[in-house]
Protein backbone atom coordinates (compact mmCIF):
# COMPACT_ATOMS: atom_id res chain seq x y z
CA UNK A 1 0.00 0.00 0.00
CA UNK A 2 1.26 3.47 -0.93
CA UNK A 3 2.18 5.66 2.10
CA UNK A 4 -0.45 8.25 1.15
CA UNK A 5 -3.06 5.47 1.16
CA UNK A 6 -1.82 4.34 4.59
CA UNK A 7 -2.21 7.88 5.94
CA UNK A 8 -5.65 8.23 4.35
CA UNK A 9 -6.69 4.89 5.87
CA UNK A 10 -5.46 5.94 9.34
CA UNK A 11 -7.22 9.30 9.17
CA UNK A 12 -10.50 7.83 7.90
CA UNK A 13 -10.62 4.82 10.24
CA UNK A 14 -9.91 6.53 13.56
CA UNK A 15 -12.48 8.91 15.04
CA UNK A 16 -9.73 10.77 16.92
CA UNK A 17 -6.16 10.44 15.72
CA UNK A 18 -3.06 12.25 16.96
CA UNK A 19 0.12 12.26 14.93
CA UNK A 20 2.83 13.09 17.42
CA UNK A 21 6.48 12.69 18.32
CA UNK A 22 6.66 9.83 20.81
CA UNK A 23 3.70 8.26 22.59
CA UNK A 24 1.03 9.64 24.93
CA UNK A 25 2.93 8.14 27.89
CA UNK A 26 6.31 9.36 26.63
CA UNK A 27 6.04 12.40 24.34
CA UNK A 28 9.33 13.24 22.68
CA UNK A 29 8.82 17.00 22.25
CA UNK A 30 7.17 19.77 24.22
CA UNK A 31 4.52 20.48 21.57
CA UNK A 32 3.45 16.84 21.49
CA UNK A 33 3.41 16.79 25.32
CA UNK A 34 1.13 19.86 25.49
CA UNK A 35 -1.19 18.53 22.83
CA UNK A 36 -1.52 15.03 24.24
CA UNK A 37 -2.20 16.48 27.70
CA UNK A 38 -5.03 18.63 26.34
CA UNK A 39 -6.54 15.69 24.45
CA UNK A 40 -6.22 13.32 27.42
CA UNK A 41 -7.86 15.83 29.77
CA UNK A 42 -10.95 15.67 27.55
CA UNK A 43 -11.36 12.02 28.51
CA UNK A 44 -11.96 10.47 25.09
CA UNK A 45 -10.11 7.46 23.74
CA UNK A 46 -7.89 8.29 20.78
CA UNK A 47 -5.43 6.63 18.47
CA UNK A 48 -1.94 7.94 17.90
CA UNK A 49 0.92 7.48 15.47
CA UNK A 50 4.51 8.13 16.54
CA UNK A 51 6.03 9.95 13.57
CA UNK A 52 9.55 9.41 14.93
CA UNK A 53 9.24 5.64 14.56
CA UNK A 54 7.40 6.03 11.22
CA UNK A 55 9.75 8.16 9.07
CA UNK A 56 7.69 7.68 5.89
CA UNK A 57 4.62 9.07 7.62
CA UNK A 58 6.68 11.89 9.12
CA UNK A 59 7.94 12.79 5.65
CA UNK A 60 4.61 12.53 3.80
CA UNK A 61 1.92 13.62 6.27
CA UNK A 62 2.73 17.34 5.85
CA UNK A 63 2.05 16.94 2.11
CA UNK A 64 -1.17 14.99 2.74
CA UNK A 65 -2.42 17.45 5.35
CA UNK A 66 -0.98 20.63 3.82
CA UNK A 67 0.21 21.30 7.38
CA UNK A 68 3.98 21.43 7.95
CA UNK A 69 4.39 20.62 11.64
CA UNK A 70 3.67 18.00 14.29
CA UNK A 71 1.65 17.21 16.28
CA UNK A 72 -1.50 17.03 14.17
CA UNK A 73 -4.92 16.20 15.63
CA UNK A 74 -7.45 14.68 13.24
CA UNK A 75 -11.12 14.24 14.18
CA UNK A 76 -13.52 12.36 11.92
CA UNK A 77 -11.14 12.65 8.97
CA UNK A 78 -10.62 16.40 9.35
CA UNK A 79 -7.44 18.12 10.51
CA UNK A 80 -8.27 20.16 13.62
CA UNK A 81 -4.78 21.61 14.02
CA UNK A 82 -1.48 21.52 15.81
CA UNK A 83 -0.30 22.37 19.30
CA UNK A 84 -1.28 26.07 19.38
CA UNK A 85 -4.77 25.48 18.04
CA UNK A 86 -5.45 22.45 20.25
CA UNK A 87 -4.19 24.06 23.48
CA UNK A 88 -6.16 27.23 22.68
CA UNK A 89 -9.34 25.24 22.02
CA UNK A 90 -8.79 23.30 25.25
CA UNK A 91 -8.32 26.46 27.32
CA UNK A 92 -11.52 27.92 25.84
CA UNK A 93 -13.48 24.71 26.52
CA UNK A 94 -14.00 24.10 22.79
CA UNK A 95 -11.96 20.90 22.41
CA UNK A 96 -13.91 18.56 24.68
CA UNK A 97 -17.27 18.94 22.85
CA UNK A 98 -15.55 18.34 19.49
CA UNK A 99 -13.95 15.13 20.78
CA UNK A 100 -17.12 13.96 22.57
CA UNK A 101 -19.14 14.45 19.40
CA UNK A 102 -16.62 12.39 17.43
CA UNK A 103 -16.82 9.28 19.60
CA UNK A 104 -19.86 7.04 19.71
CA UNK A 105 -21.58 6.71 23.06
CA UNK A 106 -20.75 3.47 24.81
Image (tube, rainbow, N blue to C red):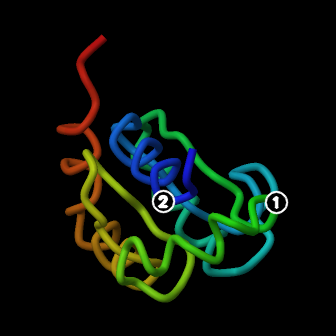
Please state, as top left, top right, bottom left or bottom right, where the C terminus lies in the image: top left
The numbered dot on residue 82 is none
Q: Secondary structure at mark 2?
A: helix
Question: Residue 3: x and y, percent?
Answer: 57, 57
Q: Residue at x 38, y 34 (%)?
A: 13
The numbered dot on residue 53 is 1
Question: Residue 76: x and y, percent?
Answer: 25, 45
- Viewer-closest of 48 and 65: 65
Figure label count: 2
- Viewer-closest of 46 and 96: 46
Query: Label 2, on which residue?
Result: 4
- Viewer-closest of 32 and 11: 11
Q: Residue at x 56, y 78 (%)?
A: 70
The answer to whether the residues at label 2 and label 1 have Cβ atoms under 8 Å apart is: no
Question: Residue 72: x and y, percent?
Answer: 47, 69
Mark sitting earlier along the chain (2/1): 2
Give the class, few, some or many, for how many residues have Cα within 10 Å of label 2's Cα (few <14, many ≥20).
some
Q: Secondary structure at mark 1?
A: loop
Q: Is residue 68 above or below residue 62?
A: below
In front of the other: label 2 or label 1?
2
Q: Is residue 19 above or below residue 46?
A: below
Q: Is residue 50 left or right of residue 17?
A: right
- Viewer-closest of 7 and 91: 7
Question: Residue 46: x and y, percent?
Answer: 48, 39
Give the class, few, some or many, for how many residues have Cα within 10 Å of label 1's Cα (few <14, many ≥20).
few
Please state, as top left, top right, bottom left or bottom right, where the N terminus lies in the image: top right
Residue furthest to the top: 106
How far separated are the C-alphas under marks 2 and 1? 17 Å
Amino acid sequence: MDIMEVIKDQVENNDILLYMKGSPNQPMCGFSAQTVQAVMECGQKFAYVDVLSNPEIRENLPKYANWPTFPQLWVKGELVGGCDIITDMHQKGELKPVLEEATPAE
